[in-house]
Image (cartoon, grey):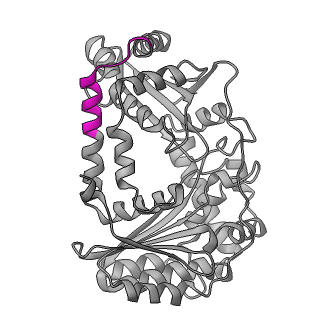
Amino acid sequence: MSELLNIDYTKFTLSNGLEVTLYKNDSFPTVAVNLWYKVGSANEIPTKTGFAHLFEHMMFQGSENVPKEKHFSYIQEVGGTLNGSTSMDRTNYYETLPADSLELALWLESDRMGFLLEALTQEKLDNQKDVVMNERRQNYDNQPYGLAWELLFSNLFPEEHPYHWPTIGWMKDIEMFELDDVRKFFITYYSPNNASLVIGGNFDKENAKLLVEKYFGNIKRNIQIPEINFPKVELKQNKKIIHQDNVQLSRIYLGWHSCEGYHEDDASLDILADVLSGSKNSRLYKELVYEKQIAQSISCFQYSAKLDGSFFIIATAKPGVELEALKSEIINLLNDVIEEGVKENEIQRAKNSYESSFIYSLQNLSSITNHINDYNCNLGEPDSFNFDLERYTGVTKTSIKHVAKKYLTKNYVELNIIPK
């Protein structure tokens, strides 16, 4: 297994600070370009939220040498695919193209890294501001259960914490976007010394090095990137929020502070979540959905971010079932895990499921290059596939009981979403 997951890569850094990782694998007929900027909503400040997500839009609105919205059409015209995403901690842009189109992707990415400001106008900002506000209305404000996650995170983390606000931003802040603030945010964070570029698949390494130097080498590094330093926070008491929404069924969310990504407890919490709700034979699903039939659905997961993490349980009640009764059953089952632990066959099933999903993801070139960028940015070692998988294969009954007791006995946030 370890030989299968080892990758041969070349890593170098340009004089302007851009980290570059080349992963050559001619078994793929395509080439993938994956660019991470180490900026997300956590880099924003109160009253100035939503900028990182805004740039996920603005970066496709044209740069000095690329007309508005041509980034998509140029890639699609050669048969490629592309997209971008924003999280609390990073923004990434990625393309997968025919092997002979690598230069096109590098030119496009370099033009918006080095020459976006020349094309950033008030008209484009106003246009994308409207787009983001509509996106927020559709996916958050007017979506059933759409405000759940911002209600949870804004209660788990205090107002000044970088994880307090939603990635999309508060509506009142989006409405107040100003061109000068947007430009300053770009200058501060969208710089080669705050980025990591991965090229994977079918390409010539020496040619790729020349192309990277050609297109990115002359982009100037920007000012020193501000570091985020925030101490761990804990809830002093349980919190309960009741939110009326346009929903048919009541739903309960329970959230605990846990640990950050790649922490020694992170993998055990992932496996615990799978043991609790990952299949029809899992603890919570079997008991509450199948046997007692008091839940319509139930799920758990460990959310591992860079600064901190959270463990969540979400259960939708059957018609006529009170959320307090559903919560009581969930807590009883959790207490059983905390006190008695779980069975070896439960852990093995969860580990097998994770390993299968992990190996399957490595059949996709875009997924591989994104893994490499994740490892490079968070671990400093692009070839961390074995390390990552072994975190999960090494989970034991003892580690599961340890994390359940360590984290799930803490104070928590309870969110009840009920029909209006």
Q: Is residue 390 above or below residue 158?
A: below
Image quarter of residue 186: bottom right
> Considering depth in this image, is 127 or 79 the residue closer to the camera?
79
Predominant secondary structure, magenta span: helix
Image quarter of residue 416: top right
- The residue drawn where x is 37% and y is 83% is 205
Q: Tell me if residue 375 is in the magenta stretch.
A: no
**x%, y% of residue 281?**
24, 23
Q: Tell me if residue 346 is in the magenta stretch.
A: yes
Q: Which residues are magenta?
A: 339-353
Is residue 345 at least partly visible in the picture?
A: yes
- The residue drawn where x is 35% and y is 28% is 396
- Determine whether, in the image, residue 368 is placed left or right of residue 187: left
**x%, y% of residue 91?**
55, 61
**x%, y% of residue 295?**
36, 19
Q: Quadrant of the C terminus?
A: top right
Image quarter of residue 40: bottom right
- The residue drawn where x is 61% and y is 86% is 64
Q: Is residue 203 above or below residue 214?
A: above
